Image (spheres, coloured by chain):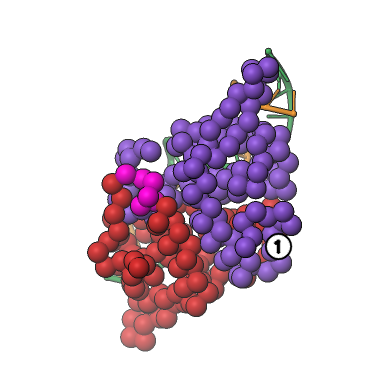
Chain colours: A red, B purple, C green, D orange
Amino acid sequence: MPSGSRRSDCPVSCTLELLGDRWTLLVVRDLLLGKQRFGELLESPEAIASNILTERLRRLEELELVERTPSETHGTRGTYRLTSRGKSLGPVIKAIKIWGLANIPDTATAAADVLRK
Amino acid sequence: MPSGSRRSDCPVSCTLELLGDRWTLLVVRDLLLGKQRFGELLESPEAIASNILTERLRRLEELELVERTPSETHGTRGTYRLTSRGKSLGPVIKAIKIWGLANIPDTATAAADVLRK
DNA sequence: CTGTATCCAGCCGGATACTG
DNA sequence: CAGTATCCGGCTGGATACAG
């Protein structure tokens, strides 16, 4: 985990510096849902651009939140999984989900949502 | 609560569209800590720029997460408080805080942290 | 299919000056 | 002090083309 230049030592601020944008946690959400391949991540309804996805996956790897396993046959094809550290973002995503459901009209979770409880 | 153009109807995605940046939740954090005046919000160690703070407060007001009470004597001077809807972001901030504390080195919460439990 | 690279418009946000 | 306005460089991210 990096602790380079930071605005403060507040854990909220630091986390936001790392993950506080409109795409990163969405990728984490999809990985929590079990998606593993690049194409699967692209297919989500939010339609992330492929270059953005590449960049986010790389950053998540650097942060050791995601682990990439290259395919043995196709050098280009890999699978992505959350590390245990990455999985520990589950409660964050869940809290966001709960807030959104309660406060934003017409939001709904996917039927297969593994975060449901 | 707006439900204008959105990338999807996922509550995580919608919440991220509204609050997913590096500053908005930091303002909410400070309001949760009890700060009420513009100057207090400026004083936080992250040193938000005043124009950014103005813009974020305005947006939070539009979202009905923050309520501004103008001063009766000084037209320019007001106080800001979270609405109940805004306060309901507490669990989100707390989940982020917990994750940061556990995963980012040398992070620490302010002594007066009302989110502590 | 799995990515990477590039172009580029627009937004974000830091610095700063300014008004009441 | 409380807030607004403006300038402007740099980053974000959409579109698209391309390579293995």
Residue at 39 percent of width and 46 percent of height? A103
Write down the region rendered in magenta. A100-105
* Residue highlighted by disc 1: B108
Q: Which residue is at the far bottom?
A: A72
**Is A85 rendered above or below residue B72?**
below
Q: Chain of mark 1?
A: B
Q: Is residue A63 magenta?
A: no
Left or right of A99 on screen, residue B30: right
Q: Position of residue B51 (x, y in %)?
A: 62, 32
Query: Which residue is located at x 65 percent, y 43 percent?
Result: B34
In percent of width and height, residue D19 lies at: 36, 67
Q: Is residue A66 above or below residue A7?
A: below
Seen from this angle, which residue lies furthest left? A111
Q: Amino acid at mark 1?
A: Ala
Secondary structure beneath disc 1? Answer: loop
* Image position, residue A42 (x, y; %): 32, 61
Does the image show residue B43?
yes
Mark 1 Cα-neighbour bin, 10 Å: few <14, some 14–19, many ≥20: some
Between B115 and A62, the one nearer to me in the picture: B115
- Rendered-image quadrant of the C terminus of chain A: bottom left
Is residue A103 one of those drawn in magenta? yes
Q: Quadrant of residue B48?
A: top right
- On the rendered image, what quadrant is the N terminus of chain A found in? bottom right
Query: What secondary structure do most residues of the magenta stretch adopt?
Result: helix
Task: Reply above or below: A109 against C14.
Answer: below
Query: x, y (%) of residue B88?
Result: 49, 49
Residue at screen point 35% across, 52% down:
A101
